[in-house]
Image (spheres, rainbow, N blue to C red):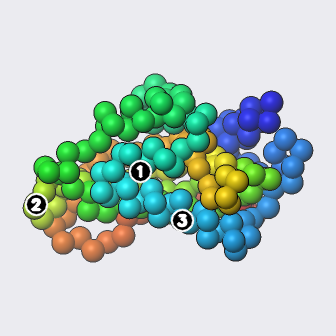
Amino acid sequence: MKSLAIEAVCFGLSVLPVTQVAGQTCRTANPLEQTALQELSDKDKEASIAGDWQTLATLWTDDAIALPPGQQPVVGLSAIRTWLQRGRIDTSKVEVSEYSIDIHSTRVCGNTAIQWGTTGIVIKPKGAPAGMRAQGNIERVLRRQTDGSWKVQRAIWNMGKPVPDKPGNPGKLQAGTRLMAPGEGH
């Protein structure tokens, strides 16, 4: 029931600020939690750039569900491993030259964290001056582990249409302008 309540808040009502989940008051992450949450994002980024699907798989819980754009839900860690392996890039031919997950808000509700943000990637043929850039939005439900680290329990994201990246483009990946209600920010 608790998981269902969290999913309803995250995936069905994500436009509302999260203040309570399953009777627990939600709050911003404290500094120790922020550090551990950032470590998860850093591991995600490093493994994504390296094309390391095995490390990416370790960042998910056993009961995880991935909701990738334009695909069927990927349910359970075993299925996520298979999905990551099938979707991996051939790093001998293609490189991820940029990858970002910029979290705009994190709400911690007990041992659950709910995040939303923007994401982007630039992929190019090995040695090429430029490739293709795609940007989008992401929402994640994370579960705190007994050691204080975090893993992804649920994730949903979208990506805009890939566009050519300009050679030597020093620009930061940005998902664009977003609309917020007055007083929103959680």
Q: Where is residue 30 in the image (x, y as percent from the top left)?
A: 74, 70
Q: Horizontally, is 152 left or right of 27 in the view? A: left
Is any atom of residue 140 visible in this view? no
- Location of the C terminus by quadrant is bottom right
How many residues crowd around disc 2 within 10 Å: few (fewer than 14), some, or many (20 or more)?
A: few
Q: Quadrant of residue 9?
A: top right
Report, in whole angstroms, how far the alpha carbon at label 3 lies from the one at label 1.
13 Å
Query: Reading the chain from its start, which is encountered first: label 2 or label 3?
Result: 3
Query: Which mark identifies residue 55?
Result: 1
Foreground tag (2 vs 3) = 3
> Residue flagged by tag 2: what amino acid is it?
Ala
* Mark closer to the observer (2, 1): 1
Q: What residue type is labelled 1?
A: Thr
Disc 2 to disc 3: CB gap under 8 Å: no
The residue sitting at the top extreme is 72
Disc sitting over residue 39 in the figure: 3
**Residue in the image at 36% along x and 54% along y:** 48
Question: Looking at this view, is 65 or 128 the one in front?
Answer: 65
Name which quarter of the figure residue 3 lies in.
top right
- Expressed as whole percent of the image width and height from the top left, the position of residue 126 reads 13, 57
Q: Give the side of residue 177 with respect to residue 97, left or right.
A: right
Three-letter code, disc 3: Glu
